[in-house]
Amino acid sequence: MELVLWCSPMTSLLRRPVSSLEFLLGEFRMNFSTVPMGTKISRSFHLSTTSLFTASSFTMHPSCARRVGPVVHVDSADSQQQAMDLAGKSDLVAIVANDWRIIPAENLVAKFQATKTQVFAFVGTVLEAEVMLTTLEVGVDGVILETGDPNEARALGRLSTSSSSTIELTEFVVSSVKPIGMGDRVCVDTCSLLGEKEGMMVGSSSQRMVLVLSEAAKSEYVPSRPFRVNAGTVSAYCMLPGGRTKYLAEQTMGSSALAVSADGTTREVVVGRSKIERRPLVLVEFSESSSGSNRTHGVILQNAETVRLASPDQAEGLSVTSMKPGDRILGSVDNSARHVGMKINESILET
């Protein structure tokens, strides 16, 4: 059996790296049921030389099909070996597995990693796609989603923005640091070990967030907790993969979080638990150092030595207990409004 890629109305394809994402569905997924067969879609696809589908544009006609490699049904050790024997002999091998999925995928990723052959996996849901794309950390080279649900196809598109990427960090200047009493704060304990220069973007407004560092730094008074970010109050926003936000109070076991480094690189992590406890709080107010605006923004954090914000001046960050006006911290600027975590265009003023 050979894999034939053509404009199937319910098949999406996601290949890695994400920077060269291609779909056999794309923005036209809602139009497939109404566009007659043979109708040309006036949209160019700028693909790399290794793309599976190399037409500059495509039509909804089987004549645009191109054979690219074999499909192997992996349901036994023998069929797994059959797939492994294709390493280096084909540009691409697509695997179909019904029962055992993860272990065969790990074996094939390991076998094919040093060869020219790419491994794709057929999946039925985006959750399966996420597993395949992270197998042995590097994942398969791509997934082919077979579904009758357009929402799964949309989710596959959102998945492309949830992998490692970068965000632009901006310098803010601290204008005041004030204790404000007691409140409920959230510690986010992730399922990953975070670096000393890594943490989460948090803000009282989604338009101006600061980088709150993890508790990976060593202290003589308390043991380090490199999986933890003492992030802020229950009402604070935190940044998520894909550019969305949510309230810290909504972070729960198994949900996604975005770990951000002081150089702007990001990665998706999983929340192991979140702890909400009543603690003394401090309001850190700041302004943009280069905008010329006098407007002040802020973030409310626990008043404790272990709560640190990333700074361009100190590699280990600045503790809120020693922070003073004039100190520089790192954060992000986004002038969009939000509706249930999604960016929208509307006028909004948060104070």
Image (cartoon, rainbow, N blue to C red):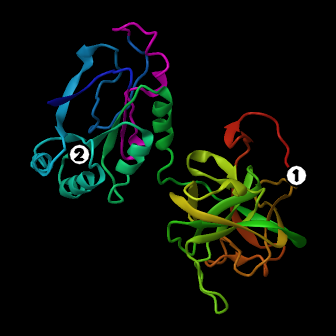
The kind of residue tagged 1 is Thr
Percent x, y of residue 68: 19, 32
**Badge number at residue 77:** none
Query: Label 1 vs label 2: CA separation?
Result: 51 Å
Residue toward you, 2 or 163: 2
* Circle 2 Cα neighbour tier, 10 Å, few/some/many (<14 / 14–19 / ≥20): many
* Circle 1 Cα neighbour tier, 10 Å, few/some/many (<14 / 14–19 / ≥20): few
Does residue 165 appear in the picture of this structure? yes
Does residue 209 appear in the picture of this structure? no
The kind of residue tagged 2 is Gln
Q: Is residue 22 magenta?
A: yes
Q: Which residues are magenta?
A: 11-39
Q: Secondary structure at mark 1?
A: loop
For residue 287, what is the image quadrant?
Answer: bottom right
Percent x, y of residue 181: 90, 71
**Badge number at residue 351:** 1
Q: Residue at x 30, y 53 (%)?
A: 102
Whether residue 348 is situated above or below residue 114 in the rendered picture = above
Q: Secondary structure at mark 2?
A: strand
Left or right of 187? Residue 190 is: left
Residue that mark 2 sits on:
118
Percent x, y of residue 337: 75, 40
Q: Earlier in the sequence, mark 1 or mark 2?
A: 2
Q: Residue at x 45, y 31 (%)?
A: 153
